[in-house]
């Protein structure tokens, strides 16, 4: 019997459309395009192994456990605006007081790459709901599931959007699984960029392990976090692992780090594994730094599969649209063993 994998997606991810990001004062075409999700979707449809499913689970109860209510309220209100919202001033002293809309933007938005455009709140809620629907399938006994989440999530902190992320999809799925009785959940983040949001959300939580391999913050976004000395806080001390790497890393060098990361996850003995999957580590990525091959992602999937854990993969970054579909397919083939 041919092996298959459930794939959850939402129509909303084909609709929301950030036009530009601002990089050092210059307008640039936005990298996180609708074309990304189209390419992945088409490649999956053609692959023959994707059982495509659009049944979402309303993620709101778990979204509210991940993000603060003033933050969610800010995102919801502003996503009704007819023009895109960008920040311009950031707090110059520690404060939570923000009465003026300009002050409010600076409080909740950490970069100029992540505008609030019309309907992005609904799209982000649906994206997180895709992740919850995927997690529910794990509870029902599916061994491997893929949620085609867009917008991505791993840069979104408890009360801060950035890095093209608004709601942290992997974190919402983790809260959901914990709430359904899972004692321990591990999150493996292999996006090129450090998952600062996921780290922030679970930094003091011993029941959610976070392990991330990424380009060093010395060279890449999000610049301030992702160092190896960030190991967790309080009861969560020892449940946060970062593997920052230099420019130019190839398949072989990357795989050495993957083996270390997977060993940590294995030893933690989680009930469930969540994977924040970014393909911006590919050699042809326009904002990347590594040199991974399309074939390598199959090996990465196979290595994760060897852990033999129920695993939900959520989509994060990956901006080389010509190869994005092939990269996702290669990874999922390895994951399900075909
Ligand atoms: C989910 C994810 O992968 N987010 C990544 C956000 C990284 N944003 C970097 C923004 C800089 C890109 N523009 C550079 C243009 C240089 N001319
Ligand atoms: Zn990324």
Image (tube, rainbow, N blue to C red):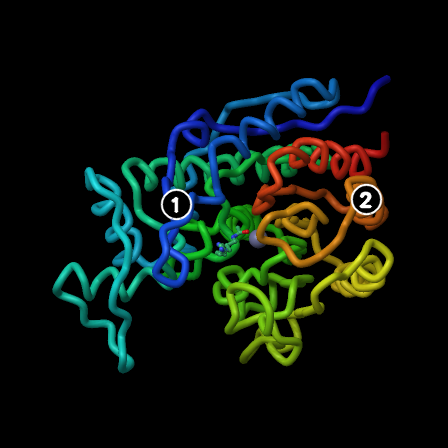
Question: Which residue is situated farthest in the front direction here?
Answer: 26
- Label 2 C-beta lies within 8 Å of the nearest ligand 2 atom: no
State whether residue 277 appears in this view: no
Residue 158 point in image, percent of width and height? 40, 61
Q: Is residue 153 left or right of residue 63?
A: right
Residue 67 point in image, percent of width and height? 38, 56
Q: Secondary structure at mark 2?
A: helix
Q: Where does the C terminus fall, quadrant-wise?
A: top right
In depth, the one of 289 and 301 nearer the eye is 289
Above or below — where is 18 with respect to 40? Answer: below
Q: Quadrant of residue 20?
A: top left
Above or below — where is 248 with respect to 3? Answer: below
In depth, the one of 94 and 177 nearer the eye is 94
Measuring 58% from the left and 53% from the top, which residue is drawn there? 287
For marks 1 and 2, give the CA distance.
30 Å
Q: Secondary structure at mark 1?
A: helix
Residue 204 point in image, percent of width and height? 53, 72
Tell me the crowding category of disc 2: few under 14, some 14 to 19, or many 20 or more residues within 10 angstroms, Cα based: some
Q: Is residue 40 left or right of residue 171?
A: right
Tell me the crowding category of disc 1: few under 14, some 14 to 19, or many 20 or more residues within 10 angstroms, Cα based: few
Q: Quadrant of residue 96?
A: bottom left
State whether residue 330 appears in this view: yes
Above or below — where is 26 with respect to 14? Answer: below
Q: What residue sits right under mark 2 in the picture?
A: 305
Q: Is residue 89 left or right of residue 240?
A: left
Q: What residue sits right under mark 1 in the picture?
A: 61
Residue 24 point in image, percent of width and height? 39, 63
Above or below — where is 304 with respect to 40? Answer: below
Measuring 19% from the left and 72% from the top, which residue is drawn there? 97
Measuring 67% from the left and 24% from the top, which residue is drawn there? 43
Which of the two discs, 1 and 2, labels the residue nearer the N terminus? Answer: 1
């Amino acid at each position: 019997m041919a092996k298959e994998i459930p794939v959850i997606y939402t129509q909303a991810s084909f609709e929301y459309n950030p036009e530009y990001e601002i990089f050092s004062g210059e307008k640039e075409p936005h990298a996180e395009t609708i074309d990304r999700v189209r390419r992945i979707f088409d490649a999956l449809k053609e692959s023959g192994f994707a059982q495509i499913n659009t049944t979402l689970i309303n993620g709101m109860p778990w979204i509210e456990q991940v993000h603060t209510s003033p933050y969610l309220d800010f995102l919801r209100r502003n996503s009704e605006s007819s023009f895109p919202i960008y920040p311009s001033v950031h707090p110059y002293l520690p404060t939570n007081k923000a009465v003026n809309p300009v002050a409010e933007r600076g409080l909740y938005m950490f970069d100029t790459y992540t505008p609030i455009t019309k309907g992005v709140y609904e799209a982000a809620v649906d994206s997180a709901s895709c992740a919850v629907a995927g997690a529910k399938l794990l509870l029902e006994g599916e061994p491997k599931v893929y949620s085609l989440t867009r917008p991505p999530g791993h840069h979104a902190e408890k009360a801060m959007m950035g890095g093209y992320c608004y709601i942290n999809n992997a974190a919402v799925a983790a809260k959901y699984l914990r709430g359904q009785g899972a004692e321990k959940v591990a999150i493996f983040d292999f996006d090129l960029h450090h998952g600062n949001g996921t780290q922030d959300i679970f930094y003091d939580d011993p029941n959610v392990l976070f392990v991330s391999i990424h380009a060093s913050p010395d060279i890449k976004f999000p610049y301030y976090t992702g160092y190896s000395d960030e190991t967790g806080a309080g009861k969560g001390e020892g449940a946060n692992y970062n593997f920052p790497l230099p420019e130019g890393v190839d398949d072989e060098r990357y795989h050495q780090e993957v083996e270390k990361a997977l060993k940590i996850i294995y030893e933690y003995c989680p009930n469930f594994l969540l994977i924040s999957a970014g393909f911006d580590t590919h050699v042809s990525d326009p904002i990347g730094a590594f040199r991974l091959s399309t074939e390598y992602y199959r090996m990465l999937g196979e290595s994760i599969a060897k852990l033999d854990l129920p695993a939900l993969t959520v989509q994060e970054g990956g901006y080389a649209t010509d190869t994005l579909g092939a990269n996702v397919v290669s990874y999922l083939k390895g994951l399900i063993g075909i």
